[in-house]
Amino acid sequence: MISAWILITFCVASLTLVTSDPCIPPGESINATSGHISSPNFPNNYDPSRICTWNITVPRRKIIKVTFLNFTLVAGENDDCAGAAADSARVFITNVASHGGKPNDFKICGQKLPPPVYSEGNFIQVRFESRTGSVNKGFNATFEAIDGDSLCPVDMILDETSGSLSSPFNPRNYPFNQTCSWNITGKQGYRVEVTIPDYNLQRCNRAAYSCDYMEVQNSFSDEALPGKLCGTPRGIPLKFYSLHESLRVVFVSDDTNMDYDGFRATYKLLNHSPPICPKEAIPLSGSGKISSTNYPNGNYTASRNCTWNITASANEKIQFVFTDFVLSECSANCSDSSCSYVKLYDGGTTSSPSLGRFCQGSSWNEPRFSSGNQMFVMFHPGQTVDRGFEAEYSVYSVTTSPPATKTAATSESETTNESETTSESETTSESETTSEPETTSESETTTNKSGTKSVTGSNQMIMC
């Protein structure tokens, strides 16, 4: 009987510890790099007319991140306490960063889970007031000391297969005088895709000397014009693709206006070519590979022409060779306007002399060489699609021989085809460069260069 009484007493004591009052005496502080706070009795209902205060201090040169795990106060009230009843429970937080210049006027009501809250320095105060209204489960949260620079890094390297990045304190307002940058990079042959579901930045005019903006460098997009992005084009998911293995995201805020929550973006690495190609030629140098869209994971897209401008040093020339070539069926001399084909130019534009036009059935496995330090490559997708192509390019000094290239044996029919590519019929093909399909593509490029190509609807990107 005595043993049973002792066991019951122990169990009651244990239960009392679980629901013990988390409020600390007024004026006392918590000095720790991390911890946990919650309303009285959580996860059971808090009592009315309670006030709990947590004064949290972390080491110098650190800031505090408060993350709410649960938040259930009075139902039906706004999270910013606007219009809340005077007797409703609420949470007050002082020394809050990114709160419109009012760090000590921050409060939370209702039942919407708040995003993380950050301190302006190494101190923050959290105060819970249950008041005399209805009661509920309350809240629990964690706090941790973090490096403030981690919210606005300088050239942070992101090399995971996927991830996210954002302006400081997002989705809360970003502070002023920030310059943040991220370098997203993949392995050789990979491309980076960045998606920006939404952004909300200070709107600025062209005459402004300073402005808040973000920029995705070394990339291209179908939804956005090249350059810096600002303003608030709500509801437009933007996709950017890297020109090569990496791209750079930059965010800058000036010393005015703290009423914008900035941006959040996700990224992932692609082990294949992007599904689209830029409106303008991709500049290339050194050595590397190029391929049709979606190669090798899927069929190329029948959209605009894709172009590349390979440039070497003044005393160098360029070697170009296909390593894979599967396009849609076409006539032997590639003259059908519905054909998919690749065309090489001995120079930096489509006005340069032709080095050959290659379609399905052409002899494609012999290297081609520039006579100078530039080569222009154009891929024209036809009305039907297939796996596409891949090619390697490299540069060599004019004082040395071209690098040795392994090529497959050329059949007699291919040799005949090759002669057609460089014979008088190629001159005819060259005149076809100005035919309707390529003229249309050329005009598209001109339209883009002039900056007059519009973005659908009222969601036009703003050039800062």
Image (spheres, rainbow, N blue to C red):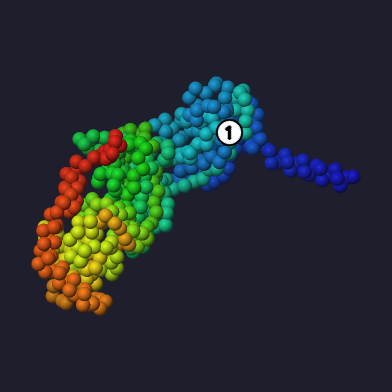
Q: Decide if residue 433 is in sight here.
A: yes
Looking at the image, can residue 190 be seen?
no
Q: Quadrant of the N terminus?
A: top right
Left-right relation of 92 to 197 = right
Residue name at image x 52 percent, y 23 percent: 84
- The residue tagged 1 is 72
Residue 436, position as x, y percentages in the image: 16, 51
Give the amino acid at mark 1.
Thr
x and y, in percent, of residue 86 in the image: 55, 21
> Where residue 267 sits: x, y (%)?
39, 51
Relative to residue 346, is residue 83 depicted above or below? above
Q: Nearer the viewer, residue 191 or 264?
A: 191
Quadrant of the rendered structure where residue 75 is?
Answer: top right
Neighbours of disc 1 within 10 Å: few (<14), some (14-19), many (20+)? some
Compared with 81, 354 (above or below) is below
Point 32% across, 52% down: residue: 241
